[in-house]
Amino acid sequence: MRSIAVINQKGGVGKTTITANLGHALALAGRRVTLVDLDPQGHLSASLGIFKPPARGIADLMQGDAKDLDGLAIHSRERLTLIPAGKGLSEIGELREGAADRAYLLRRCLQEHLRDQDFLLLDCPPSAGLLMANAVLGADEALIPVTGDYLGLNGLAQLMLTLKKFQRFRERPLRPWIQLSRFQTRRRLAREVERKLLDHFPGRVLPHPIQEAAVLAECPGVGRSIFEYRPRSRAAAEFKALAQDLIEEHTR
């Protein structure tokens, strides 16, 4: 199983949009996919049509209130499973005592209960707290959405420093993939950001940017992925390409 944390400390970069639509794209490509909502806001559930946040979720498994995924995992689409956040997830993020040990809660859960999946995507909160630590230590790869502006580059630099601090607690280095998100091809600044990413992170930038699109902002309101809402749109084609890039590990 490939476990990938969709992560960035900066908000508004499209983490949940990417998790939901990439997850469905991978499922449509024949892979068995599980999505885990690690953001206490629970927006991933709403993006997949579950507008009332489930009371139970990954928080119950991490806290030991659930012994397995029975009653927690939701069959969302064919080959696509969702594990919602659960009401107790914000409490995990606020814990201070025993934080070092609790940073491995998610990894132990994933290793024990999700061995039969092809892909696991973790939708991470926009923070550097305990939930992010669980994602970084529980995943093998990181998919980092970066917007085509100065703040996007600055956020990436800060995230890379954060990830570097976690390396000594990992058995293997975390493999980063950089994904241009909410990209505007006509903007000169966006193209400059793209060139800087290619210069500084060769072999780590995924080939197909996800462009800014109104349809992607509309999808969560109806609880559908782009493949259900506008299957013939440019955005749908971009997410299909992103899925293949990850499967085959294509980079620039």
Image (tube, rainbow, N blue to C red):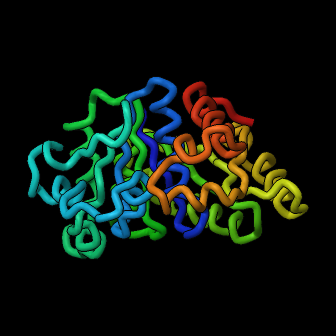
List x then y, in percent, for residue 100.
27, 63
> Quadrant location of residue 237?
top right
Q: Quadrant of the N terminus?
A: top left
Q: Quadrant of the C terminus?
A: top right
Relative side of 2 to 29, left or right? left
Q: In this view, does 53 lie above or below 139?
A: below
Residue at the spot 63% in from the left edge and 61% down from the top edge: 156
List x then y, in percent, for residue 130.
33, 66
User: Can the viewer see residue 231?
Assistant: yes
User: Can the viewer see residue 1?
Assistant: no
Relative side of 191 to 24, left or right? right
List x then y, in percent, for residue 28.
49, 30
Residue at the spot 14% in from the left edge and 47% down from the top edge: 71
> Quadrant location of residue 32?
top left
Relative side of 112 to 53, left or right? left
Residue at the spot 17% in from the left edge and 53% down from the top edge: 61
Q: Nearer the viewer, residue 157 or 115?
A: 115
List x then y, in percent, for residue 239.
62, 40
How many circles with numbers are drawn on the protein? 0
Residue at the spot 69% in from the left edge and 43% down from the top edge: 233
